[in-house]
Amino acid sequence: MKLKTLILFTAFFLIANLANCQGFLKADGQRIVNEKGENVLLRGIGLGGWMLQEPYMFQLSDVARTQTEIKSKISDLIGQKNCDEFYTRYLNNMITEKDVDALKKWGFNSIRLPMHYNLFTLPVDKELIEGQHTWLKTGFRLTDNLLSWCKKNKIYLILDLHAAPGGQGNDRPIADVDTLKPSLWESEANQKKTIALWKKLAERYKDEEWIGGYDLINETNYKLEGNITLKNLFASLTKEIRNIDKKHIIFIEGNQFANDYTGLTPPWDNNMVYSFHKYWNPTTVETIKKYLVMREQYNVPIWMGESGENNNEWFRAAVNLFETNNIGWSWWTIKKIGSESSLMTISKPAGYQKIIEYWAGKGPKPTIEEAKKTLMELAENVKFENCKINTGVLDALFANQK
């Protein structure tokens, strides 16, 4: 190749790549924009059930209150080695590149990743040395893989600490809370571990433009007078992150399931977004008016970080409400067993009900072989190619763009 041709080709390649590069998301007044200053309306999906299993997603609400209880029951049923094998396969299969490719094709431009801290670091009471933070490979490996698929598809990945050390609320399933141990708010050690985890994540992803931001703590639901303790932890997290990473958006959720912002305004960072959640109420502008007022009063963007668990008519109306008001959204959730309100439905293995009935004290105990076979079948059923796509949900979410 002649030198002139090579130079022209290289220049064309660089220009083409720059044209495709949107750059880091950032807060710009009341909007979220890319580095070109273009408004970015986030249309996202939450990966509920992957790193954190809420019992209801797997029809286990009557027999287990938390992921920890689910794991304990599985271990008692098939042994710890088999339990570990099941979870390794499950984590590898639940979200794959095929899922992310499909999300891009369907029109999603963002993913919210609900993280369980215990895939990244040991619980406080399991550290051999007090104050130590042992880092685990699994959570970082899964996140790195997901980010690589997001980058390929030009989808923003928003990291969401869904289960913080000790648990951030009284709703046990959503944060895998063990009430026999100190909560996040009762333990300085748990708060220090939360800060250390976000510092580690910031160090790892500070230069990644397809990381859409850091959703610091999901749905705190705990009595905190004036939200002072919550604000203090948010401020500490922001400070530590900004010492490392000045580029990424920091998303702040209010107390009481991301709805109470008492004491959390005004913004204390110039690249911050307030995130509210919306469930089981009318799809009228009055229901989000306080967030619209907050956006205008403090000249700060807002994001609807979690909604769903309803019917398609409600979905359609809710998305229309958000988009009419230039509010990005992230739906909940990607996959559940036997439910058509999620984006995809996981098939229920033939022997699964027998396991549930045994755990509920209503049936005989399956043999280890039977139970393991059923659970390994579940770990295969969660794969994208084995799930049913709920086109009605997709139609409802993207109806406004047709």
Image: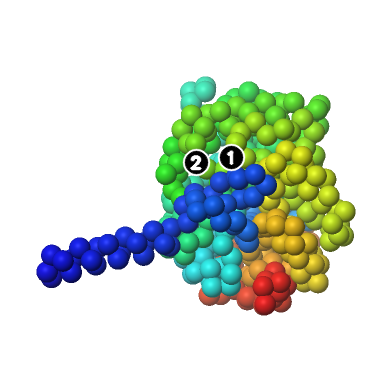
Query: Furthest-left residue in view?
Result: 2
Image vertical order of residue 256 relative to residue 233, above or below: below
| Badge 1 element | loop
Question: In the picture provided, is 8 more to the left or to the right than 163?
Answer: left
Nearer to the camera, 401 or 62 = 401
Q: Position of residue 286 (x, y in %)?
A: 87, 54
Give the residue type that dot 1 points to.
Asn
Quarter assignment of residue 306: bottom right
Q: Position of residue 117 (x, y in %)?
A: 57, 41
> Is residue 185 visible to the viewer in this orientation of the structure?
no
Query: What residue do we see at 65% from left, 31% from top?
Result: 268
Question: In the picture provided, is 97 more to the left or to the right than 374?
Answer: left
Q: Are the residues at dot 2 and dot 1 in contact (C-beta closer than 8 Å)?
A: yes
Q: Earlier in the sequence, mark 2 or mark 1?
A: 2
Query: What residue do we see at 56% from left, 56% from top?
Result: 38
Q: Position of residue 349 (x, y in %)?
A: 63, 71
Question: In the picture provided, is 350 more to the left or to the right than 18?
Answer: right
Give the residue type that dot 2 points to.
Lys
Name the residue beneath numbered marker 1: 271
Q: Position of residue 21 (x, y in %)?
A: 43, 58
Image vertical order of residue 135 relative to residue 3, above or below: above
Inter-mark Cα distance, 2 to 1: 8 Å
Quadrant where the N terminus sits is bottom left
Nearer to the camera, 68 or 165 = 165
Name the residue beneath numbered marker 2: 247
Query: What residue do we see at 52% from left, 23% from top?
Result: 131
Image vertical order of residue 112 relative to residue 239, above or below: below
| Badge 2 element | loop
Quarter assignment of residue 219: top right
Query: What residue do we see at 75% from left, 44% from top?
Result: 296
Question: In the picture provided, is 56 more to the left or to the right than 37?
Answer: right
> Is residue 246 visible to the viewer in this orientation of the structure?
yes
